[in-house]
Image: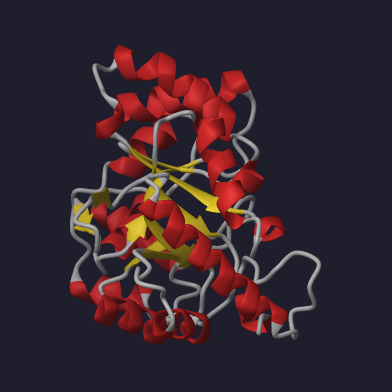
Amino acid sequence: MKFKLHSGDYMPMIGFGTYQIRGTQLIRDVLDRALDAGYRAIDSAAVYGNEEDIGKALKELLPKYNLTRQDLFITTKLSPNDQGEKAYEALQKSLKNLDIGYIDLYLIHWPGVYGVNSSKDENSKKRDLSWQKLVKGVKDGLTRNIGVSNYNVRHLTELLAKDHGIKPAVNQVEWHPHYHQPELLELCKREGILLEAYSSLGGSDNKDLVDDPKVKDIAQRLGKSPAQVLLRWALQQNLAVIPKARSKQHIDENIDLNFDIPTNDMKILSSFSQKKYSWDPDTIV
């Protein structure tokens, strides 16, 4: 299951998320389990504080699994602290931290700027400058693809109208049965942008979604876990997913998604009332 990006690169549709997974030994252990389970895409971000440990772990683990750098697809993201003039240097720093030769996908993590009021036009100007810097990063070979995260229809439309020669490859957003935006998905499909879901299971320390009686009922009938059903629901809409886990059981389970959810059950999962669990980009000008 892979998606062909504008650049011609193929991105795995199931990646391994590393949000809130920090510490040299923990990163090494979970990536060991993830590579063993078959994950070949890893998602990080500057604000996660784990890029350097991911790079160290991969140096040890790639030979263990007879893999090369080219077998992996590594994503990381620009901190809202570094929007604008500092974006190129931030990309360089992430690449140095990871120490992997090049980044496969670098995303603007948030449409706003740290320390700038969300209603100020400066947000729009700074993210446009960030995009210019990331386009240079592609041309200089630091990253092969660039994209965005938490962009709504308005932010994405603005970027597409002024993309400085490179269209975003990916838009990574909160997406699950309790919160999804059909209009945003339509825009991404129309423009050939991969929509990548985060918080597919409802977000960290939130059991509302995995404990939803309708989700549990569907999972029981299919002989799957609620987490598998939630991830498959996104995949079946041609969205990428980046579940995070620490235990071998959950890491293995989250990539074992080769099954189909019946049409009627897909409709049930898509018909819940909407409730957002993560940060809200609609407030950003």
Residue under the image location 33 percent in, 20 percent down: 62
How far across and how far down the image is residue 179, in percent? 50, 74
Residue under the image location 31 percent in, 42 percent down: 255
Where 215 falls versus 116 (above or below)?
Answer: above
How far across and how far down the image is residue 115, in percent? 81, 67
Q: In the figure, residue 100 lies in which quadrant?
A: top left
Where 40 falls versus 171 (above or below)?
Answer: above
Decide which of 248, 4 is in the foreground and name it. Answer: 4
Q: What coloring was used for the rendering? A: secondary structure
Where 116 falls versus 48 (above or below)?
Answer: below
Q: Can residue 108 be seen here?
A: yes
Decide which of 164, 117 is in the foreground and name it. Answer: 164
How far across and how far down the image is residue 26, in percent? 58, 23
Quadrant (top left/top right/bottom left/bottom right) for the C terminus: bottom right
Q: In the figure, residue 92 lies in which quadrant?
A: top right
How far across and how far down the image is residue 89, in percent? 60, 48
Decide which of 133, 17 is in the foreground and name it. Answer: 133
Q: Is residue 86 left or right of residue 260?
A: right
Residue under the image location 38 percent in, 54 percent down: 138
Q: Can residue 210 be seen here?
A: no
Where 284 falls versus 55 (above or below)?
Answer: below
Q: In the figure, residue 73 lies in which quadrant?
A: top left
User: Tag count in the figure?
Assistant: 0
Residue under the image location 19 percent in, 68 percent down: 262
Decide which of 233, 207 is in the foreground and name it. Answer: 233
